[in-house]
Image: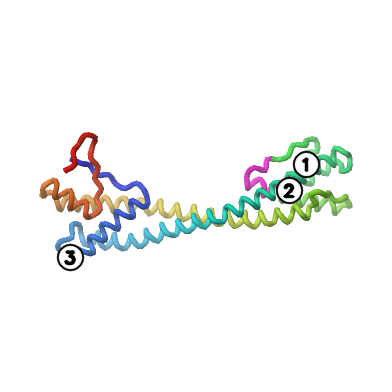
Amino acid sequence: MPYRRLPNTNQARLRSIQQAVSKGEMANLYDLAYSYKLFEDAKAFLVRYQRAINENKQCSEKQFSTSVEFQESAKNARMYISHFIKVLNMCVQRHEIRAEYKEFYGLKPDSNVTPDLSSDDSLYEWGKKIIEGEQRRLSMGGTPIYNPAIAKVRVHYDIFADGYGNQKVLQNNTVRTSENIVQLNKYADELILQIWDEVEATFADQQPATKLEKCKEYGLIYYFRKGEKEV
């Protein structure tokens, strides 16, 4: 005999509950293959589950749609900040700027290594340090660095920083809605299992072929083992 297997994806769970509810709506109270209370519970949960899945989908799509533009702004900010640091190091090597002033920027006076800017988080932190460091040095009467000037660096950094904050919000929304679905899935699995058990019990006395078809109408999913012929 074929064996049943509970759905293991959000969409599969959704389809299973929809099928059970749809069949319940078409049947009268006496023909329903599982309890009326369970039918009402499934119908109410279906609305909640569908809303949660749609919300997560919208959050994911929103995050994805804005990520392309954000990554472009991050690329520009990363280029300008890294170039500024390299020019700063060259100015120190030419003794145009005192080495100890590099500490204003969070940089080590005896190192010319450019910080790791590969992640958005590190880019956000270092961009802030570099801009504040240059402002502090200039306030002490220092000569501005050009090519790139800090004003140009700041324009690209501010664009990136705005997108960075927005992406954090969108990421948090996606994570929040995903975690909500994970919690709902626990109840969904219990609900589906209970429906399937009751439906199978209702048709337990039917012939195998008839039982299989009637159970499938309520969304039960069956699989045949290797080498096993379908009924």
Q: Amino acid at mark 3?
A: Asn
In-front residue for pair 95/41: 95
Give the magenta range: 116-126
Q: Residue 12 appears at what percent x and percent y?
A: 33, 51
Spatial separation of the CA atoms under disc 1 and disc 3: 77 Å
- Decide which of tag 1 and tag 3 comes sooner along the chain: 3
Q: Which residue is mark 2?
A: 80
Q: Is residue 92 magenta?
A: no
Q: Position of residue 133 (x, y in %)?
A: 78, 49
In front: label 1 or label 3: 1
Q: Which residue is nearer to you in this view: 57 or 43?
A: 57
* Residue plotted at (85% across, 54% down): 139
* Pointer 1 with pointer 3, Cβ within 8 A: no
Give the crowd class for mark 1: few <14, some 14-19, many >=20 residues within 10 Å: some
Tell me the CA gap for discs 1 and 2: 10 Å
**In this image, 145 relative to 217: left or right?**
right
Residue under label 1: 86
Asked which secondary structure carries label 1, the reply is helix
Q: Looking at the image, which residue is at 66% across and 54% down?
A: 160
Disc number placed over residue 28 in the picture, else none = 3
